[in-house]
Amino acid sequence: MSDEFTYAESAAAFILRQTPLRPRIALVLGSGLGGFADELTESVKIPYAEIPGFPSSTAVGHAGRLVIGNAGDLPLAAMQGRVHLYEGYSPTQVTFPMRVFGRMGIKAAILTNAAGGINREYGQGALVVMTDHINLQGQNPLAGPNDDRFGPRFPDMTHAYCDKYREITLHAARRLGKPVHQGVYAALLGPNYETPAEIRYLRAIGADLVGMSTVPEVIAARHMGIKVLAISCVTNMAAGILDQPINHEEVLETTARVRGDFVALLRAVLPEIANDVA
């Protein structure tokens, strides 16, 4: 058995010593979306570098802090940015924050990301609730010896994305009058954007979105029994959909533009998810 469990316990204990709050819901806020955590009240902000064993993000648009605070009267743990396999981190390092959340008592995780749109029905700035994923990163955080204290050797992924939470989100979007789509996310290693031929391949195998994150975290979360809701922001149309180059500045500009809708949707779904994990 690895020492990952012990390290996760130690990091969880360190975080919980910084605040009297005991969140049951965690948020992972992707590229350009970390601003929501700044709105939490009675918050403590902990740089990843100060948390034992926590990897530090190098991606532009990722602040690299864990914020524990209240949204209304609901305590949350919010990651402002994540680390990725393309930064050179191992799958174990990428999923270590999720392991720590499990040891903190987190029961539900809301994961957000910036993604490229493959489905032609999506427009730039569309919000998409993930229904499933295709892991094409060539790596899995569960490879190697299994630690039964985290979860079973062969965890089921039939319902990797909680059906109930997806319905909650779709109903909330309708109440807000905001269009929200559903789709399958393909995870690639990156850091380069995909070629037009790769996008044609991804469409052929059933992908609606493409990105470079989220899937390792989902696998680790489900391994521990944490329920998952994942929402993508389509920040650009994938290669070959539009005849124009893709750049990260466009990603950040789009997330800034849709941030209000995204935050309104998060605030609408959080109380209902909180009732589920109470």
Image (spheres, rainbow, N blue to C red):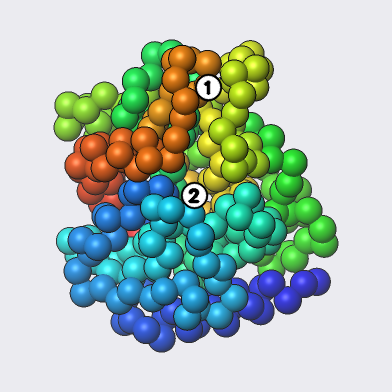
The label shown at residue 108 is none
- Residue at 80% across / 71% down in the picture? 1
Give the percent coordinates (x, y) of residue 243: 46, 15
Q: Secondary structure at mark 2?
A: strand
Along the horizontal axis of the image, is 13 left or right of 272? right
Q: Is residue 111 above or below residue 197?
A: below
What residue is shown at x 20% (from left), y 61% (from top)?
A: 39
Residue 224 horizontal side relative to residue 21, left or right: right
Mark 2 burial class by Cα count in 10 Å: few <14, some 14-19, many 20+: many
Q: How many marks?
A: 2
Q: Position of residue 134 (x, y in %)?
A: 63, 32
Q: Is residue 156 left or right of residue 74?
A: right
The quarter of the picture where residue 81 lies is bottom left
Placement of 276 over or under 117, stated as above or below: below
Name the amino acid, label 1.
Ala
Residue at 54%, 57% in the rendered image: 83
Among the 4 quarters of the image, the one containing residue 92: bottom right
Give how far apart the Cα atoms at labels 1 and 2 are. 32 Å
Q: Which mark is residue 239?
A: 1
Which residue corresponds to the image point at 63% horizontal and 52% vertical from the top-left? 85
Of the two numbered discs 1 and 2 in the rendering, the one whose residue sits closer to the viewer: 1
Q: Amino acid at mark 2?
A: Lys
Callout 1 secondary element = loop
- Please state which of residues 132 and 204 is positioned toward the viewer in this rendering: 204
Q: Which residue is mark 2?
A: 227
Quarter placement of the C terminus: bottom left
Q: Residues within 10 Å of mark 1 (few under 14, many from 20)?
A: many
Q: Percent position (x, y) of residue 113? A: 44, 43
